Every structure is written in C-alpha cells, then in structure tokens.
Image (tube, rainbow, N blue to C red):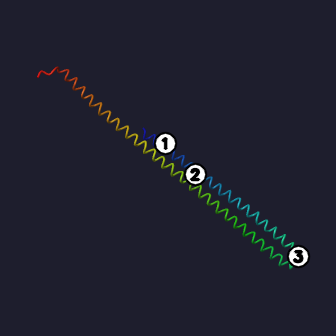
Amino acid sequence: MAAEAASHARDVKAGAAACAALDMADTAAQTASGIQTRADALAVRVATAASKAADIVSASITSGTEEEGALIALQLAATVDAAAIATAEETALAAAAAATAVASAATQAALAAAAAAAAFEKEVTNAAAAVKRVATTTAHDLALNADAKAVEVAQAAIGPSRF
C-alpha cells in the first residue's frame, strides 16, 4: 500500500515536472519568436530609414553629377542596410540564447524533480522496511510470550511437581 502511494506520488511529481518543463519550453519558443518578430520589424524600419536617407542625400547633393549623388545614396543605404542585418542577426542570436537558457532551466527542473521523486521513493521504501522490522520483532516477542504462557498454563494444569 505504501509502495503504491509512493509510486503514485512519484508519477504525479514527474508529470508535474514534465508539464512545467513543457511550459518553460513553450515560453522560450514564444519569447524567441517575439524577439525575432521585433528584430525583423526593426530591420524593416532601418531599411526604410536608409532608403529615405539615401533619397534625401541624393536630392540634397548640389555639387557633382547625378550619378555621384546616386552612388553616395546607394553607399549610405548599403551601410544602413548592413547595420540592420547585423542588428537582426544579433537579436536572433540573443533570442536563440534565451530559448536555450530557458530550455536548459526546464531540463534542470525536470532532473531535480526526478531526483526528488527518487529520494522520496527511497525514504518510503526505508520506512516500509523499518515498519516490517518492528512488526516482525513484535510478532516474534508475542509468540515467545504466548509460548511461555502456554508452558505456565500446561504446568499449572498438570499440577505441582512431586519430586
């Protein structure tokens, strides 16, 4: 009975740990997805700003030819675009690192829960063994006492010894 209760308790704790680990992993995935979405939006905003800046630079160049202005505008746009891509990649790496950290924490939580369940089961097993030892010792002592009483009763029934 105690072993069944311990097994059930262990199963419940393991199930709870698994659910917690899945919730953590789901949260990590949602966090990473959110970070990636924000990074993509930031990259679009930076690229749009780069395009506008290139247009402004192109329009504001008074000296030089139109081709020189367009070339400068393209160089500026390429520089800002490269910065946007680098920012998006860094954000994606940060999101992946966050997801990895959360998944690692979930794994550690599951391992800790499993270790706690194993320790609990060992304690229950040890307690059951102790109860068995006490019960065995008590039964043995009662049997010896019953035998001694039976001998006394038998001797009393026979009567006093005549020797």
| Amino acid type at mark 1 | Ala
Name the spot of residue 133 as percent of width and height, x first. Answer: 34, 38
- Foreground: disc 3 or disc 1: 3
- What is the distance, in whole Å, between disc 2 and disc 3 at their CAs? 61 Å
Q: Secondary structure at mark 2?
A: helix
Name the spot of residue 136 as percent of width and height, x first. Answer: 32, 36
Query: Residue farthest to the left?
Result: 163
Task: Answer with left or right where residue 88 lies relative to residue 55.
Answer: left
Task: Answer with left or right where residue 46 lies relative to residue 116.
Answer: right
Circle on res. 62: 3
Identify the image quadrant of residue 147: top left
> From what the image shows, is residue 152 above or below residue 62?
above
Q: Is disc 1 surrounded by few (<14), some (14 to 19) or many (20+) residues within 10 Å?
A: some
Q: Secondary structure at mark 1?
A: helix
> From what the image shows, is residue 6 above or below residue 147?
below
> Which residue does the numbered mark 1 point to in the structure image?
9
> Which residue does the numbered mark 2 point to in the structure image?
22
Q: Secondary structure at mark 3?
A: loop
- What is the distance, in whole Å, between disc 3 and disc 1 at their CAs? 80 Å
